[in-house]
Image (cartoon, grey):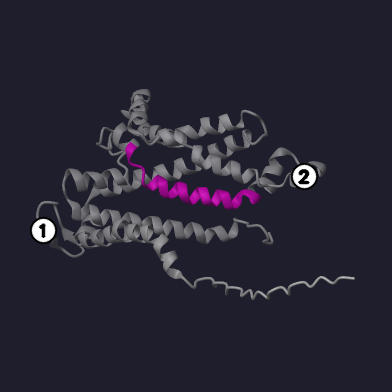
Amino acid sequence: MTTVLERPRAKTETRSKPLRRYGERPSIAYLFLSPWVVGAVFLTAGPMVWLLYLSFTEYDLFTAPRWVGMDNYVRMLTVDPHFWNAVGATTKFVVISVPAQLIAALGVAMLINRRSRAQGFYRSAFYAPSLLGASVSVALVWRVIFHDWIGHPDRALLALVLLAVWQFGAPMVIFLAGLQQIPQEYYDAAAVDGAGPWRTFLRITVPMLSPVIFFNLVLDTIRAFQVFTGAYVVSNGTGGPSDATLFYTLYLYEKGFVEFKMGYASAMSWFLLLVIALITALLFRTAKGWVFYSGEES
C-alpha cells in the first residue's frame, strides 16, 4: 500500500484593497467640471458683471465709459416713449403666443400619441419648424406671405405670433414624452366609470401632465421675451408699423448697435433680466397650487 504525499499548498494571503470613498479624489471631478466653470465665469458671469457696470455709464464703443450713475435707468423709465412701446409690444406677444403655442403643442402631441409605424415620421415633421423657425430665411418667407398684415399696425403683431406658434415642435416632443408616462390603467378606470373624453382630459391628463406643462410654460415664457430674429426681419429692423413689432430685444439692439448707446442698452438688458427673473419666480410661486408630482396628495 503506497501513500501519496501531497505537497502542502502554499497559503496565499489576499489583502483586499480599501475601497475609495465617495469624494476622496475631488480633483478628478474638478477636472471634468473645469470647462463648464471656465465658460460660466468668462462667457456668462464676467460679461454680466461688465454689463452691470456699463449700465451706469455713458459708453459708445469708441471712447472710455463715463460714469453717469442712474441716468440711463431714469431716462429709460421716465423719458423714452419707445421703451414703453417696446414693453407693450413684447408683453402682448408673450401673453398671446405662449398659451397659443402650448395649446397647439399639447393638441398635436395627443393626436400622435398612438402607437403606429409613422409616429417617428410625424414627430420629426412637427419638430422641424422649431429648428427652422428662428432662421432668417423662414422669416423672409413669412414676410412675403403676410405682406398685407405686416403693413397694418393691428395685424403685424399677429403675424409674428403665428410664426411663434408654428414653432411648437420642441414643447410638443416634451408633451409627448409626458403623455407616454401616464399609466393606461387610469384611462381604463375612467372609461369604466363612464367619464367622457373632456372629463378624462381634465381629471387625468392635465393633473398627471402638470409638471410637464409647467416646464414648457417657464421655458416658452423666457424664450418669448427674447425673440429677436423674426421681428427684425419681418419689420426690416424698424419695429414698424407704429412700433407694433418693436420687441424689447429689437429696441435694445437698435440702441446698442445702431445708435451705439451701449450704456443705455446695458441698462435695458439688466432690466429685462430682472423682469424675467421676477416672472419666473412668480410662476414657481403659483405652481404650488396646480402642479402635482408623483407621490403627492392632490
Q: Is residue 90 above or below residue 153?
A: below
Query: Would you identify the image quadrant in which residue 47 lies?
Result: bottom left
Predominant secondary structure, magenta span = helix
Q: What stretch is highlighted in magenta?
A: 207-229
Screen quadrant of the C terminus: bottom right
Disc 2 element: helix
Screen quadrant of the N terminus: bottom right
The amino acid pointed to by label 2 is Ala
For image coordinates 37% across by 28% down, the residue present is 142
User: What is the CA distance from the residue labelled 2 to the residue labelled 1?
Assistant: 69 Å
| Residue 214 on the magenta segment | yes
Task: Answer with left or right where residue 151 lies relative to residue 199.
Answer: left
Residue 64: which numbered mark, if any? 1
Q: In this view, does 258 lie above or below 47?
A: above
Query: 84 or 238: nearer the eye?
Result: 238
Q: Name the residue under label 2.
A: 190
Query: Would you identify the image quadrant in which residue 197 lies?
Result: top right
For image coordinates 37% across by 29% down, the residue present is 138
Query: 99 or 9: nearer the eye?
Result: 9
Mark 2 or 1, nearer chain start: 1
The amino acid pointed to by label 1 is Ala
Task: Answer with left or right where residue 189 lies relative to residue 275.
Answer: right
Disc 1 element: loop
Which percent across, then down, holds residue 67? 14, 64
